[in-house]
Image (tube, rainbow, N blue to C red):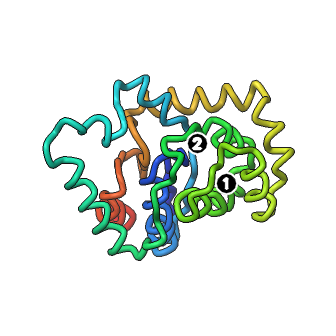
Amino acid sequence: MSKTIELIFDFVSPNAYLIWQPLSDLAEKHGATIEITPTFLGGMHKLTGNAPPFIRDAEVKGKNDYAMLEMNRFIKKHGLTKFQMNPKFPFNTITLQRMLIALPPEKRAGFIATLLPAIWEQGLDVTDSETLGKILQDGGFDASALLARTQDPAMKKELIDNTEKAVARGAFGIPTIYIDGEMYFGKERLGQIDEQLSA
């Protein structure tokens, strides 16, 4: 029986980009399926009292420098050398997350694969509707229809509900992964995820 990897996801996290391909490779290796749960990281931070590491750890001597060292090691290990910080970071992703919810589950991975390189390799401004529309149209998505659906009260409610439910389950940041009820936080847990999928 195929295992399911649930990925709590928001485009705004650089680590969401960094884990996407390695996690997809693990899923393929084990014949597992990735189930994407769109949430709003800003809302998660508000509900949990968490903050982005570069802000939270700013006063801790050496900690952010070490985090960058580890990030660069991860990038090198997984060949993610096209990665660059988006000049608009941190940017608002409510529209993107609602679009993700509006899509059928089987189309969410393609949507993510279309947008992640635009955001975290090309540094494009996805808060600009014209830029976002072109990215999506080039990726085969109906940008106008998706944008219209972001104003649907049901889409708004589902994003809020997903965020609150994720926090209630113990999630406090992105990426959070669940496999067989076990929670894994952060891109550094790929080894543990590999072991869990092998069990």
Residue under the point 13% across and 43% down: 61
Q: Position of residue 150 (x, y in %)?
A: 75, 35
Residue under the point 31% across and 42% down: 54
Q: Nearer the viewer, residue 161 or 49?
A: 49
- Answer with the quarter of the image where residue 37 lies: top right
Labels 2 and 1 touching (C-beta < 8 A): yes
- Amino acid type assigned to the residue bearing label 2 in the image: Pro
Pointer 1: what residue? 108
Q: Nearer the viewer, residue 190 or 30?
A: 190
The quarter of the rendered structure image containing the C terminus is bottom left
Cα distance in 3D space between marks 2 and 1: 9 Å
Residue under the point 51% across and 56% down: 4
- Amino acid type assigned to the residue bearing label 1 in the image: Arg
Q: Position of residue 22 (x, y in %)?
A: 44, 68
Q: Position of residue 72 (x, y in %)?
A: 31, 66
Q: Nearer the viewer, residue 40 or 87?
A: 87
Residue extending farthest to the left is 61
Pointer 2: what residue? 38
Q: Earlier in the sequence, mark 2 or mark 1?
A: 2
